Image (cartoon, helix red, strand yellow):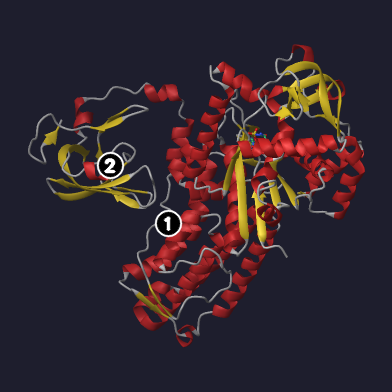
Amino acid sequence: MKNSFYVTTPIYYANGTPHIGHAFTTYLADTLARYHRHFGKQVRFTTGTDEHGQKVQEVAQQNNRTPLEQADLISQRFRDAWVELAIGPDDFIRTTEERHKKVVNNLVKKLMDQGDIYKGIYKGWYLIEEEDFYPESRVHEVSDDPENDPRLQRVEEENYFFKLSSYTEKLKAHYEQEPDFVLPRNRRNEMLSFLEQGLDDISISRAKVSWGIPVPGDEGQVIYVWIEALMNYLTSAGIYQSEEQFSHYWPAQVQIVGKDILKFHAIYWPALLLALDLPLPKTILAHGWILSGGEKMSKSKGNTQDPLTLCERFGSDALRYTLIREVSLGQDGNFDQDILANRYNVELANDLGNLFSRTLGFARKRGESELKYTRQSVKDLPVDELYQKLGDCLREYKEQMDSFQLSRAQEALVKALQTLNQFVDASKPWQLAKENQECFLSFTHLMANCLYTMAQAFHPFLPQSCDKIFRTLGTQPKETGYSIELSQLKDSIQLGETPTLFPKIKLETSKSSEKQPSKKKNKQKSITIEDFEKVKMELVTILEASSHPDAEKLLVLQVSTSQGKRQVVSGISKYYELGDLPGKQVVLVKNLEEVEIRGVKSQGMILAASNKKELSLVTVDSKIQEGSRVS
Ligand code: MSP
């Protein structure tokens, strides 16, 4: 069996900003990539941007940019977003790159030379937002009044056509032979009935669009954007560049797409591959939509969601985990900040985070640093039963992961966590700690072992948090070679720091900030001088500055106040070098409630002036005694 695993996402149009739907698709691919990498596969995960075509050309024009300037800008935005969201593709492809243009030229030329492409007249409609042709017979699918619909453009031009119709039977045969070619089943059936109706040839060029890859031998036409975009999957795999790499990775194991673009991937794409005599991908996986308030998201409805804001608030692990959890394969899933906060608090903070802190954290708090295991000392605990139940959950997890049911795989892991928490309840470690030290240490060792296994299984969904668990246990599993078998830790292990994995988030805050209309927020009532005097501010000196272990934007500052040293977490890392901060006199709000920000204690707030682009710490005009009151 092939040891490679090639997974792709669609390449995103270079006309907008990455939104939560893009983040979802890309998280799915990144999570599958991590999973297969852990289990020893040589993985290639590709995403990128789709940069040609009428849509990008028009947006560029509206913004007074050249199409390439537009594409450069948006492409970079996507790259940056993936870094921020902890998504790590092996390749980020842009369709304006030379490597892609060469591949497309070669492939289209091959199709022309072998007679799969011919010239004809296209007469019908073009829907720019989907970059799709709608002949007269199908235009009713998008509009009742095409003549007056600004989204539609009437087109009559001489184009090149691909003989799609002649591949209908071969495609049907492939669907029959490979039941997993399109997943889930309901989508497969949709595509099959589409095939049953018979396929028409499709136009694969545009005469009146200039932003694209020229048709080989005809500079007057560019290749239809969907046709060349689909070919990106071959470019990234290495076709015409490295035969060795290409044969290693192609055909792809799984190509992830949204249900809205399934026709292109499940009909046009395999037909092109059949014509090119190339193997077809193993599976096209079509996911549903992320809905906001039960509705499809759109700018005009004002219900779009920004993944970067959510990531900043909840962390990339929680965002990834929850998106995948809420949208099970084949269905649409509702998503918003409250849904995220709820899953976060229940499954991450309670089930996983609390399991970690009530076992390993508890032992650590009691000053234990070495966990020793002896079977004899836990002979009265139902360990075999526990292992059996966990084993069942882990097998279920693997089965679901291997059939791309990621949300069900998560469900199996949550069940395992619940089993473990019940085991802790029944074992009463707080009592063991008082009555039987040897048993307590063995019990905690057992829990360390189980948490280690859980962390390996959870790792593709929660990479940053699981790394923290590994650090606590002083183990860092190899990049590959993960296992979901229990009993892998040595009989004696050193217990490290036990950070809070998922600090609880107050639901009311997220609700009230979400629901409060922005106008109201600005119309604050004025406050009295007594109100103002409640805020205690003091001039302090920064002693030390270090990076926050879990958030790029934050710094952890140690400051000296009139009542001793304090620690403050501050979102200023973008604006200050660590070395520039010690010695600065700044203003501290000192009677703010102590909070934990992404696992780090913060005792107060440092004042700064800021706008969207810049930020500067508030300081004093001339040096003045530390601890002076600011009012
Ligand atoms: N450029 C084409 C793809 C070419 S692939 C050869 C394209 N780009 S896109 O930017 O419009 O959308 C890409 C993906 O985002 C699609 O899979 C689409 O389903 C997905 N999503 C866009 N909005 C979405 C949601 N609200 N929810 C889930 N995914 C959705 O199409």
Q: Quadrant of ligand 1?
A: top right
Label 1 crowd bin: few (<14), some (14–19), many (20+), radius 10 Å: many
Q: What residue is pinned by disc 2?
A: 577
Outermost residue to the bottom: 376
Q: Secondary structure at mark 2?
A: loop
Outermost residue to the left: 625
Residue 385 higher or lower than 273, as above or below? below
In front of the other: 473 or 582: 582
Q: What residue is pinned by disc 1?
A: 501
The image shows residue 276 at horizontal and vertical percentages of 81, 44
Residue 261 seen in render? no
Q: Secondary structure at mark 1?
A: loop
The image shows residue 477 at horizontal and vertical percentages of 49, 67
In front of the other: 235 or 592: 235
| Quarter of the image that includes the C terminus | top left
Q: Is residue 411 left or right of residue 106?
A: left
What type is the residue that disc 2 sits on?
Glu
| Quarter of the image that includes the N terminus | bottom right
